[in-house]
Image (cartoon, helix red, strand yellow):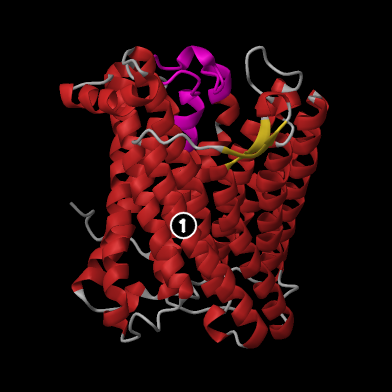
Amino acid sequence: MKLKGFRPTPRFLLLWTIGWALGLTAVIPLINFVTPLLNPSYENYWTPGVYWRLVLYWHGAIFMPLITLAACLLCLTFGFGNLRQFSARLLTESILWGGLLAIPLAGVGGIFDIYDRFAYGVPLWIQIAGFLIGDEMAIAIIIEMLMYPRQSGKGYSGVGLPYYAALFAVIGILIAAAEGHIAGWITWAGPWPSFVQGYINSTMYPVLGYYNATAVQMWTVNVVTSHSHTMLPLLMAGIVAVVAMAYGYERMKGAPKFIAALGLLIMIYMLIAVTWLYIAAGVGNYSIPTLFSFGPNDVNGIAMDDIMTGMIGWGALFVLVALLIYARRERFIRSPSFLAIVTAWVLIYLIVPGTGYYIELNEVYYGFAAPPAPGWLNDFVYLRFHQDFGMFVLPAIVVAVIAFKYMGLSGKGETRVAYTLVAGMLDVFVFGEAYFITLSYIALYLALVGAALIWAGLALGLYYSYKSPYRINCATCYP
């Protein structure tokens, strides 16, 4: 039921989403003091080793706002809202009303979703409702994107490679969401009803030679891992497609267009491959091998899935190079917002594949195996650093900056926002890496200063965007 006289607009949804994200992340110190985010006592019997307190909070505070922003920007950038067909109107309503509801449900639920029996499970089910609305948004996007080539008159050959990269990314994200629901069901309900037990038995017994609680735990943790490892790289790939369109992919010619197209083709191929791999490893029994192994018992080496997701990043790197060339030609390379996006993009490479591959090739020192290697604690710090900052916060900054520009951020306000974000990102990167290397709390505290700068930059962007007129409402691109 709609509120009397109220109808959400894209601008309202962008402001609403960023505002909620800032409010939810501002209470991190209080939440961590009351119910520590890394407290292992909150782990579940069926999914040992998963810090559910942190996972569920991040899903509500950052992930749901991130996918809502990305969905809204996808529609604005490709111009879905300009079409008059029923599917386009359905998509617009799904994103606007769905995002309006999903953000507070997932966010508030995540604050109190400590474990499944807390407050009679009400926070858990509130958050699940928010996640299901997110699924509905993804389904609506897929339906509209499949119909868009004909509705727009562009045809399937004229919609451009960013369209296909975004389409396959959203399809993979929906599959990852389904895996998350499966893992969540078993986490809270166990292998019930009987057909769940039967499927896990038929899947794991041929590999393990036994079926018991340990087999269920292994299967469920594999599903959790596949869910997150599919969701985050594919979400970032979708964001790359939006950035490419927003910064003029359709107007590119010559070398920039060729380089960007090559990168997008690599991304599309690997998006399909990665999605299939994690289906086989998640709900199947495929064991992902380690490649280029060496050292004692071949402990060092890079997991094949990390190489494949890294190849999505290599494709995105071609897109970045093309955008830089095009930005120089069109003279917006010094744009403060573009600088902030490029900074976040580069730092993702340095943190995720850069430091990550180094660790995997030195597992003798960093491994979690029993007995733990000398640098296992450094590895744990990196695990949190690359997931929380590299794969949650940095992509969120990119979509927030694009949202600010779409809402009219310019002039001195744009400069202040972008430079504050850049300073914060560089601070977190430098001292986050220092904390990973040295385990010094001084480095950790200095990294938190950078996090505060990022929050301040986003808050400034929200303020200036609120004060600015709504400038872009369709597939309008820079500069």
Q: How many residues crowd around disc 1 within 10 Å: few (fewer than 14), some, or many (20 or more)?
A: many
The residue sitting at 43% across, 46% down in the picture is: 277
- Residue 210 vs 207, above or below: the answer is above
Q: Is residue 97 visible?
A: no
The residue sitting at 39% across, 51% down in the picture is: 173
| 58 and 282: which is toward the camera | 282
253 left or right, relative to 125: right
Q: Is residue 99 visible?
A: yes
Is residue 35 magenta-colored? yes
Quarter assignment of residue 334: bottom right
The residue sitting at 32% across, 17% down in the picture is: 119
- Residue 349 vs 368, above or below: the answer is below
The residue sitting at 74% across, 39% down in the picture is: 358
Query: Mark 1: which amino acid?
Result: Leu
Q: Quadrant of the C terminus?
A: bottom right
Quarter assignment of residue 202: top left
Q: x and y percent of residue 390 in the render?
A: 63, 45
Q: Dot 1 lies on which element?
A: helix
Q: x and y percent of residue 124 in the render?
A: 33, 27
| 145 and 21: which is toward the camera | 145
Find disc 1 in the rendering and name its residue: 271
| 456 and 158: which is toward the camera | 158
Image: magenta residue range: 31-59
Is residue 167 magenta-colored? no
Q: x and y percent of residue 327 in the render?
A: 69, 78
Q: x and y percent of residue 42 in the render?
A: 46, 16
Quarter assignment of residue 330: bottom right
